[in-house]
Amino acid sequence: MPWISVIIKTDSMHVEALSDAMLELGALSTDIHDSAAGTEHEQPLFGEPGESIAGIWLAPELTALFKGDTDIPAVMRAAAEAAGLAAPPSYHIEYVEEQDWVRVTQAQFNPIRISSRLWVVPSWHEIPDPAAINLILDPGLAFGTGTHPSTQLCLEWLDENLSGGEDVLDYGCGSGILAIAALKMGARHVVGIDIDPQAVEASRQNARLNQCAETEIAFHTQMPGQMDTEHAGWADVVVANILANPLIMLAPILTHAVRRGGSIALSGILVEQAEEVMQAYRQSHDMHIARNREGWVLLAGTRK
């Protein structure tokens, strides 16, 4: 039996109430998005931790997924009443056929060539170049599959700047992709830190997929205030692919971890945010924009 996808046109005042009502009435999932997405009228909304997003799209669209035997007209009447609408909003239905969703998801991820010697390869895919450094990843609950420009910028920077034998800190490790890459490129010892326990577990699983020795790579769950302050300057290289605001907040902590003469690489930063992030690190590092792609930049610097 196919699933039923209900696509609803509404307004910003009622969309969240309608979404809540749909879930109460049996929707398996709901999604609110800009009905003008992909057109010249698309309304961008940006936000980061520590920032609030002003309002919602002026012309939102709500998609709700139901089982195939659901009485959609009855659901729409009840949802409209719950949301304080006099009548159901306009909507249309699409049918979603049952599929092998694992295969559908896997088809979205293909091997990515980062450089002449470095590839990111999903765990179920055949390795395209056995002679290269292949990062075997199982995309799951953690950020970092190699598809995002900021991740690629970090991988390229590591590929160009690691010479072997370094101690490396990957702060905000996500899937562990950067930590694992550093080790496979010759780092002596790598530590990955994340505030999300699921990310740390995903990193450990991916490290095992890549046959990384536990004596050479370790992943920990830590909040910023829990960073070890007794081992200043232990890392030759610190890499952090997070977001601009957290990177600004973490400047004293990340700086503390880099030895004098060591390197730091920061990404997850939009071009227009670069100057503010660099300013947070300039007292201790000689910062510059090292790479950029699709509106994202990687900042790099040497500890003074």
Image (cartoon, rainbow, N blue to C red):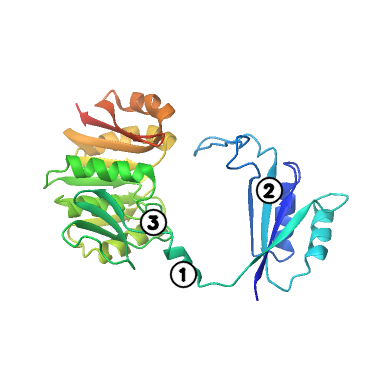
Which quadrant of the rendered structure holds the C terminus? Answer: top left
The residue depicted at 19 percent of the width and 38 percent of the height is 233
Left or right of 109: which side holds 176?
Answer: left
Task: Give the SS element for disc 3.
Answer: helix
The residue depicted at 40 percent of the width and 29 percent of the height is 271
Task: Give the SS element for disc 2.
Answer: strand
Q: In the rendering, at what x and y percent does residue 16 appear?
A: 70, 48
Q: Nearer the viewer, residue 182 or 74?
A: 74
Q: Quadrant of residue 108?
A: bottom left
Task: Identify whether 228 is placed above or below 65.
Answer: above
Amino acid type at image mark 3: Ala
Q: Nearer the viewer, residue 288 or 109?
A: 109
Task: Identify whether 177 is placed above or below 74.
Answer: above
Disc 3 packing (10 Å; few <14; some 14–19; many ≥20): many
Q: Which mark is residue 199?
A: 3
Left or right of 101: which side holds 174?
Answer: left
Amino acid type at image mark 2: Glu
Q: Nearer the viewer, residue 6 or 260?
A: 6
Task: Identify whether 132 is placed above or below 152.
Answer: below
Q: Which mark is residue 102?
A: 1
Q: Tell me the CA gap for discs 1 and 3.
A: 21 Å
Which quadrant of the rendered structure holds the N terminus? Answer: bottom right
Q: Which residue is mark 2?
A: 61
Asked whether the viewer can see residue 93, the reply is yes
